[in-house]
Amino acid sequence: MLTTWVNNLIYAAMGSQMSTIKDILSQQSSSDWCYPLTPYIPFPKEKWPVFENGLISDIHILPDKLQRNLTNDSWYWWCDAQFVPFNDVSLYTTCSVYHPRPGCRWTSVPHMPSGRVVLYNFLSPNSLKCIIFSRTNSSVWPKVNPHPIGQLVAYCGTGETVIMSDKGDPVYSRSRDLTNAVHIYCATANNGVSFACIKRGIGVFFLEYHNIDTSILVHDSIRCHQICQDFVPSKIGNDSVACKFSPNSKQLSVSISTGVLFVVTRSKLEKVCIICPDMLDGSLSSAESFDYDPRFASKVLTVATTDGFIQTVDIETGTILRSVEAEDACDCLTYSPDGLFIAAGFHDFDIVIYDRDLTTLHTFPMSTICQDQLQRVQPHYPTVLHLSFSQNGEHLASTSCDGHLRIWRIPKILTLQEMCRDKILACLPVRKVKYLNGIPEKMKNFLLYKYI
């Protein structure tokens, strides 16, 4: 048995030469999961010391060569950082900086990059490296969306949505259509070929579902207020939105910072339910304050609401499965890839790690680090903008309105199975695990973090 296992690993690692990414995606089934063409890269823990509060790295998200004048303490940094799938040393980042103007549309700071995409490499604290994609920019709240294949990243630029390679070359793009609506948010499903965009027009938001083949093809489009009448742009236009695919890629949850969260099917974008404000009391706390539990196909969401609760809900029955009262407003929320942890970022800068039953496991007291940043905090805008778990759940990346990217080490004890998984995935392209012969399907699913 051991000999068969080793032979399978060698055969899969050697494999024939991979086709191009476009060829692979053109053959990818919408019912299957998409995985990287490269082996898993674990975070080199032995090289990074841990501070008492769990922090291992704290850098300004904008690389030194792009910084011009960072001394204005009133600027508000809208930034994002996401780990590359199955690559715990690489993060895609982006940011824009704004002059906050209460009651008015915010304007970006002149002569500062807006929406520049950067790929950071955290192999060593002594030689932190980054690739700056100079042709990238954005005129909306910037967001990066790493593709599950690992070598692509999507973002909404100026006038178009782009999926580019890790070399900076556009692989797919879609410009504005006859509606002249602006692409403001995009998301890629676990199957690698389902792609969603939210666009903002005059007095209306559009939700589009695309299929990634040789190009980005529009399959369906709806006006969001047709699902929920309150899902419309505000007059000043500072709304933030978000959309996330379910783990099985068959549903989409769509949100707006004014507190609405609804769910539609991927096929035909038909209404499933309105979670906030219909199913749950209170409005959604923030556009990013929800996520799907990866251990279920599409029916379990955890949501933070304005009444101060974080709740896990079965969207098929409307049943609240678990609930916990938070001490502050929740700005963002995300599950770890294995579904064991939930990270929540709060308006006072603190980050709390919950288990799947919403029991508090650990708190990262970022508020103690950011005492001198309180003047940046805006009452109706997030303080902790985005959170991202590493693949094995040992590290968490956070971005906040002070423009900093921080990496935290989660006090997690890996099981023997999990340590073996890391070692195995580092030996062969992750995508080839599902083609191994003589390996039980349950074991393959465990190796690939597939729990449904």
Image: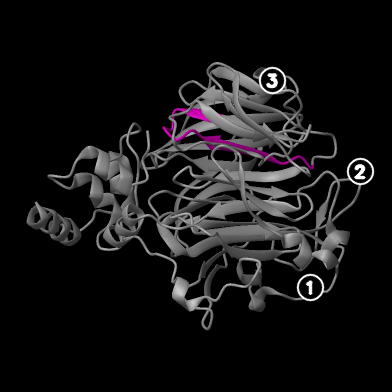
**Residue 392 as seen in the image, left or right of residue 130:** left
Q: Residues within 10 Å of mark 3 (few under 14, many from 20)?
A: some
- 224 is higher (above) or lower (below) than 443: above
Q: CA distance from mark 1 to mark 3?
A: 41 Å
Residue at the farthest bottom position: 126
Q: CA distance from mark 3 to mark 2?
A: 25 Å
**Residue 310 as seen in the image, left or right of residue 163:** right
Taking the spot 24% from the left edge, 53% from the top edge, the residue there is: 19
| Disc on res. 89 | none
Instruction: Please say whether residue 242 is one of the residues in the magenta stretch.
Output: yes
| Magenta segment boundaries in residue numbering | 238-252
| Disc on res. 103 | 2
Q: Position of residue 234 (x, y in %)?
A: 81, 34
The quadrant the C terminus occupies is: top left
Disc 1 target residue: 70
Check disc 3 and give the amino acid type. Answer: Cys
